[in-house]
Amino acid sequence: MAQEIPRKVIVVIGVGGMGLPICRRLASGRRLLLADYLVENLKTALAALSSEGYSVEGFVANIVEYSAVRQLAVKAASLGQIEAIVHTAGVSPSIASAKQIFAVDLLGTANVIEAFLPSASPGTSLHLATAPLDQLLQHKGIDFEGSNPGMAYALAKRGNQLRVQAAARAWGSKGARLNSVSPGVISTVLGQKELQGGASAMVELSAARRMGTAEDIVNAVAFLTGPGSDYITGNDILVDGGTVAGRRWHT
């Protein structure tokens, strides 16, 4: 009986508009562990990727619960050496309240960063302010009632950028890296909904004058997980077609 050749492991959290294209770009020749909170969405994604020839397993996890994310990390480590963790799960202002955004986008990301650290090894990369997890949502700067969803989304994003910076040294001590990616208005199902909430003005202000595509984000993630980015860690990569530049200099 032929012995199975060990494969490195890619973990992708979230099977939405960006999760699946990232799977297809990174998972060839690897073992793919795909995680999501919604069981039916996960089953559909697993069936699609399996039919395309990928070696893929699924794991149901609610990233708001640290214990669930830690179980996901343990499962991933049991499959082999973890090469990359790509966290794409999140909610947006068009579909979620401020409280939900803080819980999923802020606390959920912090859970992923902390839960996977014990499983990190030289060559592992995680792509996506420092308060203990059990105190994060009690921080005085987080106001569930007073924050509108748009403000909550911006605060959560900034909090994630700071947490990536703060955690970079701990990950570096294990020979691993972590970075975040900040997309602009991307043409996914959620992105199309955001156009109805004012995001179209952001597109008009951008230098590119178009919505981004999932492929634009995949290209950035593929670079960050590759050997050409070994010296990049603790950073946020802005992939927004010049939207921030447009808002800063032309409004």
Image: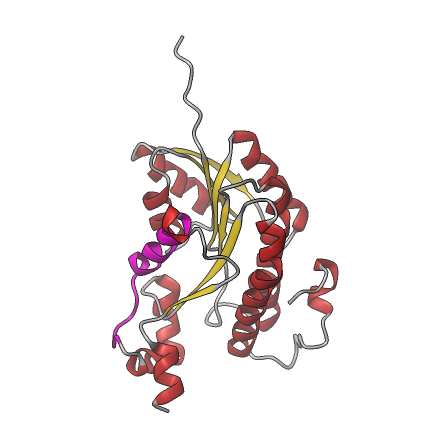
Residue 134 on image: x %, y %: 74, 59
The magenta stretch is 208-225
| Prevailing secondary structure class for the magenta stretch in the rendered image | helix
Q: Quadrant of residue 245?
A: bottom left
Report the front residue among 38 and 51: 51
Image quadrant for the N terminus?
top left
Residue drawn at the location 39% of the way across and 11% of the way down: 2
Residue drawn at x 49%, y 72% as measured from the top left = 93
Q: Residue furthest bottom?
A: 251
Residue 137 in sight from this viewpoint: yes
Q: Nearer the viewer, residue 147 or 165?
A: 165
Is residue 63 in view?
no
Among all residues in the image, which is located at the extreme top?
1
**Above or below, 55 relative to 109:** above
Question: x, y percentage for residue 178?
Answer: 52, 54
Of residues 190 and 240, which is closer to you in this image? 240
Q: Is residue 2 left or right of residue 173?
A: left
Residue 131, x across and y down, in percent: 70, 64
Quadrant of res 186: bottom left
Total marks shown come to 0
Is residue 223 part of the magenta span, yes or no? yes
Query: Residue 139, image x and y in percent?
Result: 72, 71
Residue 58, compared with residue 203, is above or below; it is above
**Image quadrant for the C terminus?**
bottom left
